[in-house]
Image: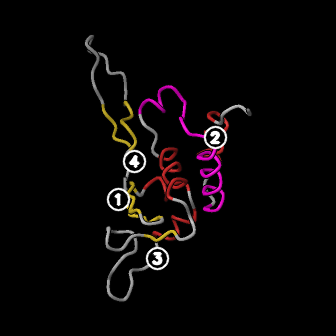
Amino acid sequence: MSAVLDESASDGTVPGPIAGPKRVRWGGIIFFKVEQFILEAPRYRFAEHSQVFETMFQLPAASDGTVEGRDEEHPIILEGYRAAQFYALLKILYPTPDDSIFGIFKLEKEEWIGVLNLSTRWSMKKETCYQRALQGFPEPD
C-alpha cells in the first residue's frame, strides 16, 4: 500500500497525486542453525523468494508455544547443509550496498555452487539466485 501525497507546485498549479514508497514488511528476524553456527537474517527475503520457507513460517507454534526460528534458543535447524554455503546464500539475498550499486557479487566458485544448490533445494525464485550467479560466476580456468 503506497501513500499518496498531493503537493502544490510553486506556481500555484496542482500536479496531481504523487505515489509514495511501497511499504515493506520486514517480518522480523529468523534464526537458523547450520552446523554449529547460529545465523540470523531478516525473515522477509526467505518468505518472498522461497515457497518452502513461506510455508514453514506459516506453521503453527509447538504445543509449548515455541516457534521454530523465532529466537536463538529455538533456531530452524538445517541439518546436512554447510554453513559456508548458507552464508553465501545470505550474501545473495541481502547484498551490500556495493553489491547492489555495482552489480558484482564477490563469491568464489564453490560459494556460487552452494548458492545454486540451496536455492534449488528450497525452490527459490530463479531470478533471485540464478541471474545473480550468471552475472558473478567466475570464468572457467
Amino acid tagged 3: Leu
Which tag, 4 or 3, sits closer to the chain's start?
4
Viewer-side residue, 27 vs 137? 137
Q: Name the residue under label 3.
A: 59
Give the vertical position of 60 relative to 112 (above or below): below
**Side of 36 where 81 appears, left or right:** right
Check disc 3 and report its element: helix, strand or loop: loop
Q: Residue furthest bottom?
A: 63
**Side of 129 where 24 appears, left or right:** left
Check disc 4 and report its element: helix, strand or loop: loop
Magenta region: which residues? 97-122
Q: Which mark is residue 133?
A: 2
Examine the structure image and report whether residue 54 is included in the region drawn in magenta.
no
Q: Mark 4 points at which residue?
A: 1
Quarter occupied by the C terminus: top right
Label 2 and label 1: CA atoms lie apart by: 25 Å
Q: Main secondary structure of the magenta part?
A: helix
Label 3 and label 1: CA atoms lie apart by: 16 Å
At a point 61% along the width and 39% down the height, the residue shown is 132
Give the vertical position of 57 relative to 25 (above or below): below
Which tag, 3 or 2, sits closer to the chain's start?
3
**Side of 84 where 119 appears, left or right:** right
Which tag, 4 or 1, sits closer to the chain's start?
4
Which callout, 4 or 1, points to the residue nearer the camera?
Answer: 1
